[in-house]
Image (cartoon, rainbow, N blue to C red):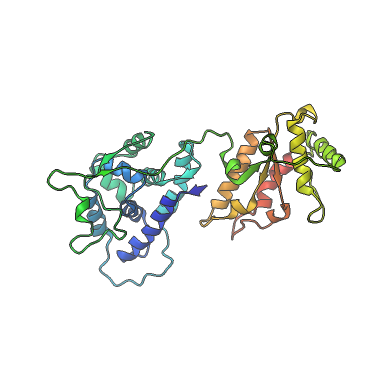
């Protein structure tokens, strides 16, 4: 699953907050400090709508975790087990809302799902629970919110000469500034969001007239459609030198499907080309690659109308493999064996 740019910024800020406070770990409290520091996104909107005193919460956390010792902090600060669990929960939270992109509000919910961390304890004092925040997140648009006790998002470090927050961001003399989120959230209605994100619908391209007619490959296309129509052993593989037209044969099949010049079994099928490079790209954290590929396999299982085309299939071997994890080939093997 992908993380939004806002979440990526929050993760980076959490590392910097841990360094600033002299901590040799990154915990849930650093994630909340990073959300406040980011000063934007739906999670920040939720915090503002709850009328929380963010300045006081920030100082409470800092006083609880700041160390007075001179600790040498390296470039790679480890995550606590609880933080690793939060990064897993964020995926589940996003899916519950039907989103394929994990965003800051999902991160905030994942933090509050753990009832034992410092953030949850602070929120419980304010009579704010996971359910309270979830109810707010479920609103499609929080809208303009009074930026009461907020922070100035233009100040990246959140510090100035007199205070760690810009004085302009705090309510003064009963006057408040207005905060409106600029981030757009789109509800995904597609049955195959993972495939849509990491693949190309060749059948749709054929319907839109973006594919040229295929000449001289009728025999191969016919054989391809025959194999795909089988009940078992229905996974054909095209072998040939580069440039001989292997991908063109698949495009020819897509053209035949929309022209209904195939067996009835293939009527209404979608041919989707999977881009392995896109799946591997950006998989920074352990388990992200497996999560993406598993989501694709689950969608294929629940949508039998999809015919998956993997160009350069040899790249599956070793793709996404890390110590103690499976590569793409081994993850796909059971599905291919079952047809």
Q: Which residue does the image show at 75% across and 41% down from the upper left?
A: 212
How far across and how far down the image is residue 56, in percent? 21, 51
Can residue 115 be seen? no
Q: Which residue does the image show at 31% across and 46% down from the upper left?
A: 120
Image quarter of residue 19? bottom left
79 or 9: nearer the eye?
Answer: 9
How far across and how far down the image is residue 336, in percent? 72, 43
Q: Quadrant where the C terminus lies?
A: top right
Image quarter of residue 224? top right
Q: How many marks?
A: 0
Q: Which residue does the image show at 78% across and 27% down from the upper left?
A: 264
Q: Which residue does the image show at 80% across and 36% down from the upper left?
A: 225
Q: In this view, does 299 lie to the left or right of 4?
A: right
How far across and how far down the image is residue 202, in percent? 68, 40
125 or 96: nearer the eye?
Answer: 96
Q: Which residue lies furthest to the top in this view?
A: 264
Q: Is residue 153 left or right of residue 327?
A: left
How far across and how far down the image is residue 185, in percent? 43, 40
Q: Is residue 72 above or below residue 275?
A: below
């Amino acid at each position: 699953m992908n993380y939004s740019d806002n979440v990526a910024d929050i993760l980076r800020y959490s590392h910097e907050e841990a360094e600033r406070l002299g901590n040799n770990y990154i915990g849930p409290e650093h994630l909340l400090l990073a959300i406040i520091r980011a000063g934007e996104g739906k999670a920040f909107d939720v915090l503002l709508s709850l009328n929380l005193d963010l300045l006081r919460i920030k100082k409470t956390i800092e006083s609880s975790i700041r160390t007075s010792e001179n600790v040498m902090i390296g470039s790679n600060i480890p995550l606590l087990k609880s933080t690793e669990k939060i990064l897993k929960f964020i995926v589940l939270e996003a899916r519950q809302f039907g989103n394929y992109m994990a965003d800051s509000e999902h991160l905030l919910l994942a933090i509050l799902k753990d009832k034992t961390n410092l953030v949850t304890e602070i929120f419980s004092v304010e009579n704010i629970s996971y359910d309270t925040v979830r109810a707010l997140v479920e609103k499609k648009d929080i809208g303009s919110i009074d930026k009461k006790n907020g922070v100035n998002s233009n100040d990246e470090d959140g510090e100035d000469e007199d205070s760690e927050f810009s004085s302009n961001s705090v309510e003064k003399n009963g006057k408040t500034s207005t905060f409106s989120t600029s981030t757009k959230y789109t509800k995904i209605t597609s049955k195959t969001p993972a495939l849509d994100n990491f693949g190309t619908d060749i059948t749709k391209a054929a319907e839109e007239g973006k594919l040229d007619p295929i000449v001289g490959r009728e025999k191969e296309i016919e054989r391809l459609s025959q194999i795909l129509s089988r009940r078992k052993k229905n996974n054909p593989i095209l072998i040939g030198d580069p440039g001989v037209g292997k991908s063109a044969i698949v495009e020819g099949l897509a053209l035949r499907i929309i022209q209904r010049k195939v067996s009835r079994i293939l009527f209404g099928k979608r041919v989707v080309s999977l881009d392995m490079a896109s799946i591997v790209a950006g998989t920074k954290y352990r388990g992200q690659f497996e999560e993406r590929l598993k989501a694709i396999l689950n969608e294929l299982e629940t949508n039998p109308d999809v015919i998956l085309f993997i160009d350069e299939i040899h790249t599956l071997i070793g793709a996404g493999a890390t110590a103690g994890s499976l590569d793409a080939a081994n993850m796909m093997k059971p599905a291919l064996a079952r047809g």
